[in-house]
Image (cartoon, helix red, strand yellow):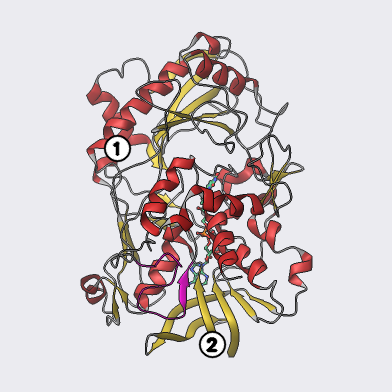
Amino acid sequence: MKLHFDDLIIGAGSAGCVLARRLSEDGSRRVGLVEAGHWPGDPDIADPLKWPALQNRPYDWAYRTVPQPFTANRIHGWSRGCIVGGSSCLHAMAHVRGHPTDFDAWREAGGESWSYEALLPAFRRSESFSAFTHSWHGADGPLPVHLPDEEVSPVVRAYIAAGQALGAPALPDHNSGDLAGTTPNSLTIRNGRRVSLADAYLTPDILDRENLTIVTGCETERLVIEGGRVTAVLAVLDGETAHIEANRIILSAGAIGSPLLLMRSGIGPQEALKRAGIACRIESSEVGENLQDHLLGLGNVYRARQPVPVSQLQHSESLMYLNSDDFGRADGSPDIVLACVVAPSIADGLQAPPFGSAFTILFGVTHPRSRGRLVPTGPGRNDPIIIDPRYLEHEYDRATFRKAFRAARAVGHHPALDAWRAEEVQPGSAVQSERDIDDFIARVASTHHHPCGTCRMGSDGASVVDPDLRVRGLDNAYVVDASIIPRIPSGPINAAVVAIAEHWSASLR
Ligand SMILES: Cc1cc2nc3c(=O)[nH]c(=O)nc-3n(C[C@H](O)[C@H](O)[C@H](O)COP(=O)(O)OP(=O)(O)OC[C@H]3O[C@@H](n4cnc5c(N)ncnc54)[C@H](O)[C@@H]3O)c2cc1C
């Protein structure tokens, strides 16, 4: 099979869906969107309460890390959507742009066009807030952002009251500038149903566009490179090799898929490619490097004094961003985060009380300093990948995680939660010493599902893509997804990924 497009987008995830809509607005360009997975068919995807159960289903790539020495040698499961909508079909729906100062590192990496101010129109263009409470909010973008009100659990209200009593300011929401403080989560939910990026951006009127072709069940194996250009893409479709040509190739295969595609095509660190039996065509030492992720401790669990009502949202209703040195007002970007889950939430292997009889406070670090990497073991799409996030390798991460745990406990034991808390059951009152806390953290730190940074954007020659997101060494290939993030923002990253895609497509106009 042979296809030809002006623009070929690889991967119909969060970024790919945005790009398909925006690039096909120019009716003179033929746009192709190829996705390894298929259109969603599982009704559970739309149910916000079912999100934890979606992991490991057939539309999950279900990656696994190598054992992590600083998390008790555990192997961590990494869910990634293999479906139209990508990981936005599996995610927990929290919409957090990040603290404006998070983007200072992006500006340092790529110049003024990557500052928060420069990205603000892209955030706003993507969003449609249920209540327009701040001039920074988007009002008529494709992605609905719900600001919950009466539905917020009474347990979460008590947790928010505890945070405020300890000094954390009350915020109107997570996307009005300041991020340090308490507020229920803003959620990409409409009428009680998840809105994936496919739901938001690939609406029926877009699917009717004659210049847009979406090919599902089509896994790209590698790029064909001739004379500094990608001349074609080789993919597998219905068991056959598909040969897809395009003038411009955009990799939106995500923080794992995009660097893998580059490396399988011979673009990457020479030594790693050699070990995988791949001929190096363009040496690019940082492909697959700079891997960053947030961890959350699952969790500081409390047996409840009264039945805990089932969440009317998506279980984890309120992220609380804090400055660990001063529980209250953070100047600039916060360094720790808590989250209140209206259920027991505990890492594998630990005991938790039954559903309905407990609540949990999760805890984590907003700007981890550990940096990991991923490499393929061979040139084929079925060759295993080595994913090594090097969780908690950096002493700063371990020390800050301890502070986050102590902050979780301070909130959990606060009198504002007296009506709900019977007793702490994880880790339990015996765990007090630094050593015991570190052991607990090592056993419960789990991915918050935000891998990014593996095709770092920057003005420096070592970066994988330049500030226009063009792959260094190639004239017509770009990466537009979570992998270009130079430094992870404070919060969940989906809003930032959407903004990256909006921002880049606007720069072409
Ligand atoms: C369980 C979970 C919970 C999360 N919770 C939140 C949250 O509450 N809030 C938040 O902001 N973020 C959350 N995230 C993270 C967020 O969903 C992702 O960061 C974001 O979706 C990444 O977007 P992307 O476009 O970079 O990649 P993806 O959305 O992963 O898209 C990549 C796409 O490329 C396709 N692909 C990959 N390789 C190939 C190939 N070779 N050929 C063809 N297609 C390919 C994939 O199948 C996929 O569809 C969560 C993620 C998960 C998994």
State whether the magenta stretch is mostly helix, strand or loop.
loop
Q: Who is closer to the viewer here, 132 or 348?
A: 132
**Kind of residue sitting beneath label 2:** Glu
| Any part of residue 360 in sight | yes
Other-residue count near label 1 (Cα within 10 Å), few / some / many at <14 / 14–19 / ≥20: many
From the viewer's perspective, is residue 55 above or below residue 101? below
**Quarter of the image with the C terminus in it:** bottom right
Q: Which residues are magenta?
A: 464-479
Tell me what residue is drawn at x 37 percent, y 28 percent: 404
Q: Which residue is label 2 attached to?
A: 245
Give coordinates of residue 69: x percent, y percent. Answer: 24, 45
- Dot 2 falls on a residue whose secondary structure is strand
Q: Which residue is label 1 attached to?
A: 397
Q: How many marks?
A: 2
In the image: residue 495, left or right of residue 454:
right
Q: Who is closer to the viewer here, 14 or 180?
A: 180
In the image: residue 166, left or right of residue 462:
right
Tell me what residue is drawn at x 53 percent, y 17 percent: 164
Give coordinates of residue 35: x percent, y percent. Answer: 57, 71
Give the residue furthest to the front: 112
